[in-house]
Amino acid sequence: MLLLVLLVLSAGGYQLGRRRSLAVSADDGAAPGQRLHSLPSYYGFHTALWTGIPALILLALWIALQPIVITQLVLSDLPAEVRLLPEARLNLVISDIKNLASGNIVSAQVDPAMRAAADHYLQLQAISSAALTVVVLALALGGISIGWRLVSPEFRARNSVERMVNIFLVASSSVAILTTLGIVLSVLFEAIRFFQVVPVTEFLFGLHWSPQTAIRADQVGSSGAFGTVPLFAGTLLISAIAMVVAVPIGLMSALYLSEYANRRFRAVAKPLLEILAGIPTVVYGFFAALTVAPLVRDAGTSIGLNVASESALAAGMVMGIMIIPFVSSLSDDVINAVPQAMRDGSYALGSTRSETIKYVILPAALPGIVGGILLAVSRAIGETMIVVMAAGLGANLTANPLEAVTTVTVQIVTLLTGDQEFDSPKTLAAFALGLVLFLITLVLNVIALYVVRRYREQYE
Amino acid sequence: MNISAMQQARVAAPAAATTIKMHTPEPSFQEREFAGTVGTVTVDNPKIVSRNVNVYYGDKHAIKNVSLDVGANEIVAMIGPSGCGKSTFLRCFNRMNDTIDSCRVTGEIRLDGEDIHNQKLDVVQLRARVGMVFQKPNPFPKSIYENVAYGPRIHGMTKNRAELDELVQLSLEKAGLWEEVKDRMDQPGTGLSGGQQQRLCIARAIAVSPEVILMDEPCSALDPIATAKIEELMDELRANYTICIVTHSMQQAARVSQRTAYFHMGDLVEVGETSDIFTNPRHKLTEDYITGRFG
């Protein structure tokens, strides 16, 4: 509501600033808008910004701080014995008061002190919101008047509007960066807590993974083993199978599309291929678990092989299919980036299309293709849904694609789903796994981007 | 060979190789009306004969009924304002226009009397016989050696490494680049200067021993010194090859060519001996162009 009013006020500020700028310039006897430093609309925007921004900042701060201030005020009115309760109990009392104030059901019977506190709480809220409205509107109107006052032919409205826009853009991009940083830090701290319990060396080099820990001290059998080698081996195995499927198919389809296919076929086939990338991974997951895995098992049995029903082969194959569009569209891009002059040069020497591809285009595009493949690998390593549904849970250390293996991502999911206490090594292990996984994909991405960028510079 | 020697060679050239006849029909062709073109399109001992060539890019009629002969061991320059179709016409000679989807070529083009659009003729063989050098130097991102060895390799022209080495050296020598690069054959060809790159491209074209070399504005990306080197080289190459060059520089056309063809809006307006065209143009458009009134 208040936001809407602010918007209207800002629009009004725009109009006022614009008119004012025209009027100011007309005062000097020149034609309207003639002697202004900036276009009239910049004066309008400048006034609108003065109206909206300070008021918005105040609004945001107020809403953020209001609950804290009100709670403190209510608390200070509570009897002394309540105030001196330990932190956890105090929080319970406060939430009781809040529930009471909003008319929800309260756990115990209402005592008069609580009732009074709740009324006080409500009263403070009403005062606060009224005050907020008044202050914000006053600030907005004040902004209009400042903006109005500032309008003069010499005033450089364009420069200051552009500076504001610049600040907006910087702020938006820093949101993304700060979020990434926040995620990394939170994972990092939890992982450090885990490594205080389990040594890093055991975590990285242990050959046994069995994350069940004892809940009570007298429980037997589940001491917990956090050797991640089987998990990473499983991840590597499945990713390798996926790449074996995706790289040849993706690369060849990219070659066909960019070098052989005529334009009409390409216009149809390329979006169709990219639809593969749009299929939700969960759908791939049950395709793998319900269709491909039994198929692989039956095929294996018919030639006398013993295939697990959740084989790494099935999960890897489906993941490979998922990654095909990655490989093909990235390779397609780099192949198209090879200058036509290279092709012309090769054709003019009398080489055929396939010779040109083999000896000129592929060598020239190779760094870019490798970069694309590395990006696809990091995607495969981080992929979760398919392996959760189609790969097993048993942490087997094996290189046999017909056996069931498990992956890092699968283990993170199983460690964190269900009711868990968040300070046992079992759950903290998930963060440590996540951290290592993140580092691996980060390194792969950095290498890939470096390779791709170096390649780009070659022709520009 | 220095510049004055070049000039001597040029003066001697027309008499020796290509005496231009007045409208004598080729035995294998019927007498045709070359409407619109001023001058004589035929020559005595033609290497390439083209008759009534039309090129279309989609709906655009880029080359309109052009007929032009190129004599053996002669340099023909094609000049004209941008977009007049001279490059398009040049690219007809080795069927490079085939690589453009929307492009359609009609008419008759004969290389040594053999129709290059003949179904039996392999376009790969044609392009080995008619080499091409492009406007921008386009060495492959490989070593200098590999750049030159590329053509002989794909055509299986040499039996062993020693023969290939010899052919690479010979080609680079012919292109006047050997002395400059002989110590760094394994370095990337893209690391050379623009003029060296262009001579590398010429060496690459020579390596497959073509009969005709097409040059599409070979010096437009080069500085005057590199340009002078290439022009000198072209004059040397003329002894063994037939050369067609498209150029924007009229001075260049005057310096290197024996015959000049002036294109305008897809038409071949005028063709004749270079000295005649530049001193005594017969068509108004040609005169306007070479006197710098437009284009």
Image: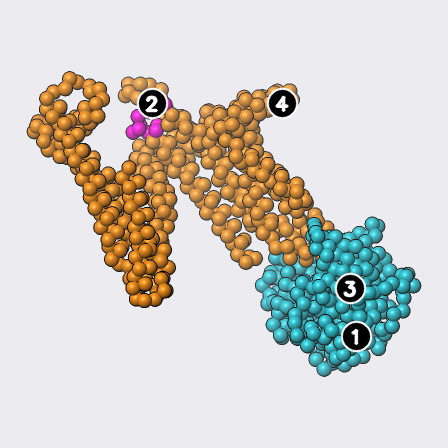
Chain colours: A orange, B cyan
Tell me which corner region of the image, top left, top right, bottom left or bottom right, holds residue A443: top left
Q: Which mark is residue B201?
A: none
Q: Amino acid at mark 3?
A: Val
The residue that mark 2 highlights is A419
Residue B157: give x, y in percent of width and height: 77, 57
Q: Which mark is residue B273?
A: 1
Q: Amino acid at mark 4?
A: Ala
Q: Quadrant of the N terminus of chain B?
A: bottom right
Q: CA distance from mark 3 to mark 1?
A: 20 Å
The residue that mark 4 highlights is A299
Q: Are marks 4 and 1 on the same chain?
A: no
Q: CA distance from mark 3 to mark 4?
A: 60 Å
Badge 1: few (under 14), some or many (20 or more) residues near its Cα, within 10 Å? some
Q: Earlier in the sequence, mark 3 or mark 1?
A: 3
Front position among marks 2 and 1: 1
Q: CA distance from mark 2 to mark 1?
A: 94 Å
Badge 4: few (under 14), some or many (20 or more) residues near its Cα, within 10 Å? some
Label 2: chain? Answer: A
